[in-house]
Amino acid sequence: MKKNLYIITDFDHTITSIDSKSSWNILDNKKIMKVKDIKLCENLQKYYLPIENDEKISLNEKEKIIKKWYDNHLNIFIKNKIKEEAVNKISSDKNCMTLRKGAKEFLKYAHEEEIPVIIVSAGISNTIENFLKVNNCLYNNVYIISNIIKYKDGIIKGFRSEIINSLNKNKISFPAKIEEITKNKENVIVLGDNISDTLITPKNKNCIKIGFIRKKEENKKYFDLIYDEDSSLEEIIQLIETTN
């Protein structure tokens, strides 16, 4: 299994713990943002998060709504003229986010076994990369597909391309390098903490979809395996070893 396996995973609350700050939220910091704008970001989350998790709303309708959340949050960053050096400083603190239990062991194991790990995240690539690097987890088999901050004169001006949000991951095209690495691998493990993370499941592959999510009845139809929200990523190592 290992030889023909690659892993696609969410980042926030999947590689990081369920109670960790997100790769966006770490920039909602009074050192670089006005307090009233931090409060505004908190209010945006309180309003939009229940919508993101509401299964009664169609995917297309929900995507349009959630896009506004991401656009508004990004515009607050732009309004506060956050500097590149500040982004790098905050995200290079090894404690700015919290890794899920077993994350270091999981990423080290995947590296040693030469299993590609593709992080597909609605978060911010810059902060994810810095955080993994400072925690010695950014191995050469780890690839990050996420929102990349665009700077002008050292200040945030937007993202390099259309915002990746939690509801449009199915529209993401993998870079040619990743397509080449994965094209002959038939087995895929997809990891996430939300049913929307299953949108990144590739077609025509042998997939196991694993959720670190509450074992509610409605979630069972989206995932093949469900672990508790705070379970260790070492569970994935054991799964690979026992099915090898």
Image: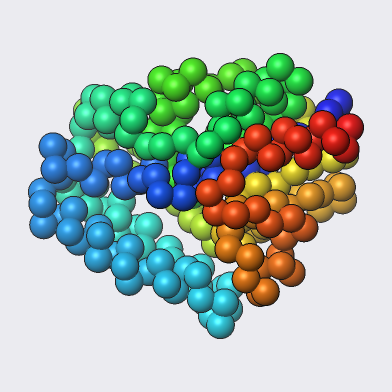
Q: Position of residue 201 (x, y in %)?
A: 73, 52
In depth, the one of 156 and 24 nearer the eye is 24
Q: Position of residue 27 (x, y in %)?
A: 27, 41
Q: In this figure, which colouring scheme has been used for the structure?
A: rainbow
Horizontal arrangement in the rendering, residue 155 relative to residue 219 (left or right): left
Check the image and report above or below for 139 versus 151. above
Horizontal arrangement in the rendering, residue 108 relative to residue 78 (left or right): right
The quadrant holding residue 141 is top right
Image quarter of the C terminus = top right
Look at 58% across and 46% down and name the residue there.
Answer: 231
In depth, the one of 232 and 47 nearer the eye is 232
Check the image and report above or below for 2 versus 54. above
The answer to whether residue 145 of the structure is visible from this angle is no
Image quarter of the N terminus = top right
Look at 15% across and 38% down and name the residue there.
Answer: 32
Q: How many marks?
A: 0
Horizontal arrangement in the rendering, residue 187 relative to residue 112 (left or right): right
Look at 41% across and 20% down and name the residue there.
Answer: 134
Q: Residue furthest bottom?
A: 56
The quadrant holding residue 48 is bottom left
The answer to whether residue 155 of the structure is visible from this angle is yes
In depth, the one of 33 and 74 nearer the eye is 33
Check the image and report above or below for 41 versus 113. below
Check the image and report above or below for 178 versus 124. above
Q: Position of residue 226 (x, y in %)?
A: 68, 57
Look at 75% across and 43% down and name the residue there.
Answer: 189
The quadrant holding residue 158 is top left
